[in-house]
Amino acid sequence: MTTNTVNKVAIIGAGFVGATTAYTLMLSGLIPEIVLIDVNMDKAEGEVMDLNHGMPFVRPVKIYAGTYSDCKDADIVIITAGANQKPGETRLDLVTKNAFIFKDIIGNIIRYNHECILLVVTNPVDILTYLTYKLSGFPKNKVIGSGTVLDSARFRYMISEQVGIDTRNIHGYIIGEHGDSEVPTWSVTNISGIPLDDYFKANHANIENRLPKDEIFKNVQNAAYDIIHKKGATYYGIALAVRRIVEAIVRNENSILTVSSYLDGQYGLSDLCLSVPTIVNINGIKRIVDVPINDEERDQLHQSGNALKKVIAQLKI
């Protein structure tokens, strides 16, 4: 066990996702100090005022608005800033706009801090995690993307709705790109160790239809688009996913999460960032886990990786 501790988190971006992330971390009681940084200082200050007025209801935590210089002693810097995804726009459509923004953000962070863990949330998260890794010069274990942690949660939730079991007892992953080419790992999905298909057959014998896997995955894949269409943005789910990643780091859990990170040969993929089951602890990424997915899923993962590589090539990093 390491003696390292996390005492301060900086959040870059005070929009829907950044502010909601600050709220979830405030409620968690995990972090003694949180600084919210945004180009619009009034927005950051307004969010901080609102959060601080709830201070009597939570564990003591210092929350304030700051500038990039306040990153200097942060243990984790969470990046949520960037252009928002618009209705009808894919995550990859955002890449050119947000790559430009990120060059400025990363430059400002590393001016003050070379020791922190960088946690990227902005979309397209896999491309921007890769860009962050390349621009920062940080070791690969210190650069993490929120990846498909939320997609995997959506996957588990939607299966739970079909089988009537608590989501926490359903184990399965969405891997690959956090986006249109993501891959459901049906072959290793289980309910408390029982393969999903076996559980469904044994406990739903009165249901003629099979588990509607195509429908479940389509709902997972389109979830963000549906939410954006209905309310303009997604932020509760992703903020909770970020809180979960931070928790795994702070508590040195060695938890397995589908974060996005730099691959250099795992699953036959190299020189890109995407999501596969990964052990997360106080040092960031401990190692990537080689889950025995089937050949079809592995092929789909490679297709997802190739789609991301084409976008990376266009960036000319």
Image (tube, grey):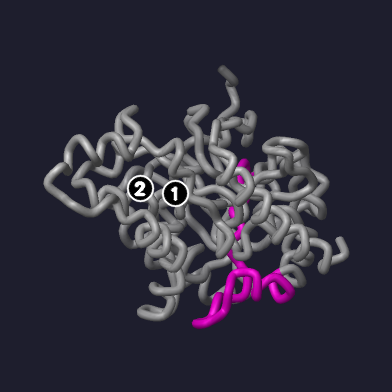
**Is there any visible trace of residue 37 in the rendered image?**
no
Residue at the extreme front: 208
Query: In the rendered structure, does residue 90 fall within the stretch colored magenta?
Result: yes
SS for dot 2:
helix
SS for dot 1:
helix
Q: Depth check: give the residue in front, 292 or 234.
A: 292
- Amino acid on which disc 2 is placed: Arg
Total number of numbered discs in the rendering: 2
Indicate whether 184 appears above or below 228. Answer: above
Q: Marks 2 and 1: CB-CB under 8 Å?
A: yes
Residue at the extreme top: 1
Give the left or right position of residue 190, taking residue 250 as reference: left
User: Residue at image x 71%, y 56%?
Assistant: 69
* Quadrant of the image containing the C terminus: bottom right
Q: Depth check: give the residue in front, 229 or 173.
A: 173
The image quadrant that residue 234 belongs to is bottom left
Q: Which residues are magenta?
A: 74-98
Residue at the extreme left: 206
**Where residue 223 sits: x, y (%)?**
41, 66
**Where residue 64 sits: x, y (%)?**
51, 59
Query: In the rendered structure, does residue 260 fall within the stretch colored magenta?
Result: no
Q: Depth check: give the residue in front, 7 or 296.
A: 296
Give the left or right position of residue 85, taking residue 99 as reference: left
User: How many other residues sit within 10 Å of disc 2, few (<14), some (14-19) or many (≥20)?
Assistant: many
Q: Which residue is mark 2?
A: 156
- Amino acid on which disc 1 is placed: Ser
Q: Which residue is mark 1?
A: 152
**Where residue 209 sits: x, y (%)?**
23, 54
Q: CA distance from mark 2 to mark 1?
A: 6 Å
Q: Which numbered tag is attached to residue 120? A: none
**Where residue 126 sits: x, y (%)?**
65, 56
